[in-house]
Amino acid sequence: MTTTDSTATKSAMAASTAVPPFAVISGAQVQRALHGREKQIVELVEATYRVHGAGDSVNPPSYFLRFPDRPSSRIIALPASIGGDVRVDGLKWISSFPENVKAGVPRASAVLILNDHDTGYPFACLESSIISATRTAASAASAADRLSRHRPRPTRVGFFGVGLIARYIHTFLAGTGWSFDDIGVHDLSADSAAGFRCYLEQSGATAPITVHDSAEQLIRNSDLVVFATVAGEPHVSDPSWFAHNPLVLHVSLRDLAPEILLASTNIVDDIEHCLKANTSPHLAEQLTGNRDFLDGTLDDVMAGRVTVPTDRPVVFSPFGLGVLDLAVGKHVYDEVVRSGELHVVDDFFHEMSRYG
């Protein structure tokens, strides 16, 4: 190889491994990129589940940062890598401080870092509470559809816990074609229940809205039950409340006693992730000493490997995978780039020469 050839090869290699510019994407930009695209995001989330199910991803266990002086609060790190068409690595760093609500501040805040697949350099930092709520709601809407395809389609929905996540789930259900004859609401906070009812009315919901005084009333009067609480341990323990075999979106993961799961069909997003951190499925595993109560994953249902029965309650317990945040975050990044509104931080990476 001549000197010229060698120089050309090095130049080509340098071009192929160029460090991407670093950008910051605000919550307002995230919302604009996602608003009104519920069907598209559900399709993206389902595609990500398929890529993850095929093994073209890395999704290590989440890391929980807890505080002895603030036991109800935590910050969680979700590292992940997704292949397929997305091809991006990254990390979601999300905090949950329930006491914020008393001060009128949202409970959760988050950022998402996207890393370049080839160089490993981070190329974007995105406000991620909206991304996190969006991917959670899209996952729930997908499960509601997929798990009811061989069962009577629910006509009465009940929301147990009515914060930001419940609002996003309702938005995604409505945005993917769901309508209901009745909408139930239950929350320990009367103000929150009233606020959610107001949101439903302003969103154009035409079904009668009932604020239930008790959890039992809500569950017994709902074919589709959405748990979106901040519960740290099970608080619903009577299997008879589920005798009408509802579809349960157990988004908050720790509401149901193991006995309820053991009397139900159980679908999760990822078995290893769901059976950790004293989630309800984890408690069921500890109680029984096995995982026989699990019927499969949502990917199994989509692929036809698992058929959902009609004669039992069906519980979907999604731990929430970091690969979903990456897929939605990369979608947002691409939309912002297309809009011409990407805010690049010039010279963010300063020491770019190996020897100074």
Image (tube, rainbow, N blue to C red):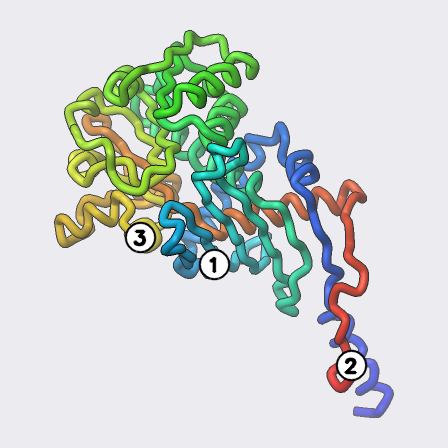
Q: Amino acid at mark 1?
A: Ser
Query: Which residue occupies the foreground of this view, 214 or 322?
Result: 214
Secondary-structure class at tag 2: helix
Secondary-structure class at tag 3: loop
Q: Which mark is residue 9?
A: 2
Which residue, given by chain and number where applicable, does mark 1 sit on?
57
Residue at image location 42% in from the left, 7% down from the top? 208
- Viewer-nearest of labels 3 and 1? 3
Asked whether the viewer can see residue 155, the reply is no
Give the mark, 2 or 3, whose residue is nearer the N terminus: 2
Q: CA distance from mark 2 to mark 3?
A: 50 Å
Query: Which residue occupies the foreground of this view, 149 or 166?
Result: 166
156 sits to left or right of 244: right
- Point out residue 227 in the picture as x, y percentages from the top left corner: 35, 31
Residue at image location 73% in from the left, 54% down from the top? 23
Give the mark, 1 or 2, whose residue is nearer the N terminus: 2
- Point out residue 240 in the picture as x, y percentages from the top left corner: 15, 24
Density class for disc 3 (Cα within 10 Å; few <14, some 14-19, many ≥20) is: few
Q: Quadrant of residue 14?
A: bottom right
Give the mark, 3 or 1, whose residue is nearer the N terminus: 1
171 sits to left or right of 126: left
Q: CA distance from mark 3 to mark 1?
A: 22 Å
Which residue, given by chain and number where applicable, does mark 3 sit on?
277
Q: Which mark is residue 301?
A: none
Asked whether the viewer can see residue 186, the reply is yes
Q: Amino acid at mark 3?
A: Ala
